[in-house]
Amino acid sequence: MTFMQIHAIVLLLLLAVFCAAAYRIGRRRILIKRERFAQRPSIPVGDIYRSFYADSGLNRQEVTRLWNLVASAMKLDPEKLRPGDRFKEDMGPIKGYPVPDELEDLEALYERRCGELGIKPQHGMVITLDDFIRFHITGKSAR
């Protein structure tokens, strides 16, 4: 085996170890985030709509779609979430894990939606899951 082949094998092994470690760290971070909601009873998203949004005039399919979008992006169970859940406090980053958080994806979606609606993003106005849903459907903040 030549020096270059050994060097390439060592680099591949180091890359594999790094990727495995990053995966484990990311997986652990998500498990810790999910523990925040573990004690909550599961409520089907349809029941959440009936309890919190039925009288709002918001489209059921759109509320459900956005609810599931947020849950998926945040890697959380949609049946454990509630309208008052705050993005930065309840669903936010886990301290001690220096990796990008799922909130970055939602912020990009929010900014894209603002562009579609032709309005300036007001990051301080979308604090909760309910704020996110209402904004994306109506283009207006509830705050």
Image (cartoon, rainbow, N blue to C red):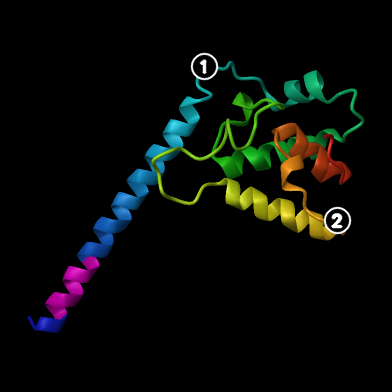
Q: Is residue 97 magenta?
A: no
Q: Can residue 65 be seen?
A: no
Q: Residue furthest front?
A: 124
Quadrant of the image occupied by residue 124 = top right
In percent of the image, x 67 and y 38: which residue is there?
Answer: 68
Which badge, 2 or 1, comes first in the chain's sequence? 1
* Secondary-structure class at tag 2: loop
For marks 2 and 1, give the CA distance: 38 Å
Q: Is residue 104 left or right of residue 95?
A: right
Q: The magenta stretch spans which residues?
A: 5-12
Q: Residue 42: x, y in percent?
A: 60, 19
**Residue to which mark 1 is pinned:** 39
Q: Magenta stretch containing residue 8, yes or no? A: yes
Q: Residue furthest left?
A: 1
> Alpha-carbon neighbours of circle 2 within 10 Å: few (<14), some, or many (≥20)?
few
Report the front residue among 127 and 31: 127
Position in image of residue 35 (x %, y %): 46, 26
Q: Position of residue 120 (x, y in %)?
A: 82, 56
When the figure is inspected, residue 122 is found, relative to residue 127, above or below; the finding is below
Please tell me whether mark 1 sits on a helix, a strand or a loop. loop
> Which of the image's four quarters has the N terminus?
bottom left
Which kind of residue does numbered mark 1 sit on? Gln
Q: Quadrant of the C terminus?
A: top right
Q: Amino acid at mark 2?
A: Ile
Which residue is tagged 2?
A: 119
- Give the vertical position of 64 relative to 105 (above or below): above
Q: Residue at x 48, y 33 (%)?
A: 33
Question: Is residue 132 shown left or right of residue 107?
Answer: right
Residue neighbourhood size for the residue with mark 1, other residues' Cα within 10 Å, grouped as few (<14), some (14–19), many (≥20): few
Say which residue appears at 77% left-offset and 53% top-offset.
121
